[in-house]
Amino acid sequence: MLSEQAIPQRITYVNGYGIRYLDFDSISNKSDDYNSVILLHGIGASAERWLPIAPTLSKYFRVLVPDIVGFGYSDKPTVEYTIGFFMDFLGGFLENLRIHTPILVGSSLGGYLATEFAIRFNTRVKKLVLAAPAGIMRSSTNVLDQYIMAALYPTYENALRAFMDMAFDPSIVTEKTVRDFVNRMRLPNAKYAFMSTLLGMRDGSLHPDRLSEILSPTLVIWGDKDSMIPFQYSTEYSRIPNSNLVVINDCGHTPYVEKPVVFNQHILKFLI
């Protein structure tokens, strides 16, 4: 895996907010709108969450990984984090980078945003990959509650417990992952953005019938032992007309972290 120093970090301004992103284009030299992959992380995460798979993807595609507005090291304005607000962010980010027809890959919250974008702008997404996407689940789970607690009370112990519960194999949780989360959740407005996003997701929850409006070829990937957004919710995504479901065995909520080689095999087979 590339060292973090080797990955070019960039800043772009979307609707006046500074957005930090990782740009693998200068490594891959594949500056091509139609082969641009955007990786969208989950709630409370940052672009670094995708480092287990992004370097491999960048051998084939232009890969761009933003810190979604309100998270990571992007600006965290005191606004309502509605789904519409996130759609404006994603549309502006793509416009700034002159990408009209992206491949969207989203996990959890990022999967919800990618899904919503593919519904609202259904001729603009080349392909869609959803890893345990949020949006359909109406009630919380114990693991999600633990993660929310770690975000609001970001101690090392709380975060470690949350990340270990999120994974099927707790040994994949590193000290760096936990400390990065704690440090980011202690940034100004981080807790506010997190809770406002939860409210925005609840108020803008995705009706399963809308999934049939997605035109993009879609790959849905789920860990069979996901205890944050349980595997049972995967059945709803069969409503996407041109979709396939891949189940990764003995895997929790973040298959690209827990089983990166298997995840990349599936995603590259689908994209190439």
Image: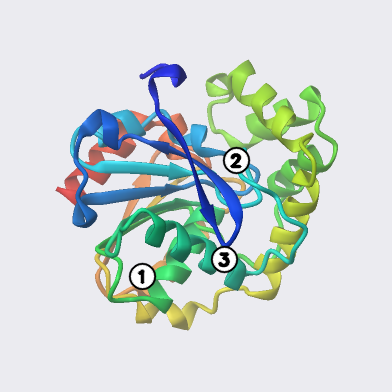
CB within 8 Å, label 2 to label 1:
no
State which tag comes first along the sequence, 2 or 1: 2
Q: Nearer the viewer, mark 3 or mark 2?
A: 2
Q: Position of residue 20 (x, y in %)?
A: 53, 41
Residue at the location (77% across, 41% down)?
Answer: 151
Crowd band around label 2 with a 10 angstrom C-alpha radius: few (<14), some (14–19), many (20+)? many
Relative vertical location of residue 108 with respect to residue 95 in this rendering, above or below: above
Dot 1, crowdedness within 10 Å: few (<14), some or many (≥20)? Answer: some
| Residue pointed to by mark 1 | 238
Q: Earlier in the sequence, mark 3 or mark 2?
A: 2
**Amino acid type of disc 1?**
Ser
> Residue 135's spot in the image, x, y percent?
57, 66
Q: At numbered mark 3, what does the secondary structure look like: helix, strand or loop?
A: loop
Is any part of residue 250 visible from this angle?
no
* Quadrant housing residue 67: top right
Closer-to-camera residue (44/158): 44
Q: Left or right: 203 with respect to 98?
A: right
CA–CA distance in space, label 3 to label 1: 15 Å
- The answer to whether mark 3 and mark 1 are in CB contact below 8 A is no
Q: Residue furthest right?
A: 153
Q: Residue at x 30, y 70 (%)?
A: 124
Q: Which residue is mark 2?
A: 45
Q: Secondary structure at mark 2?
A: loop
Residue named by callout 3? 135
Residue at mark 3 to residue at mark 2: CA–CA distance: 17 Å
Question: 257 left or right of 70?
Answer: left
Which residue is rendered at x = 27% and y = 50% of the image? 36
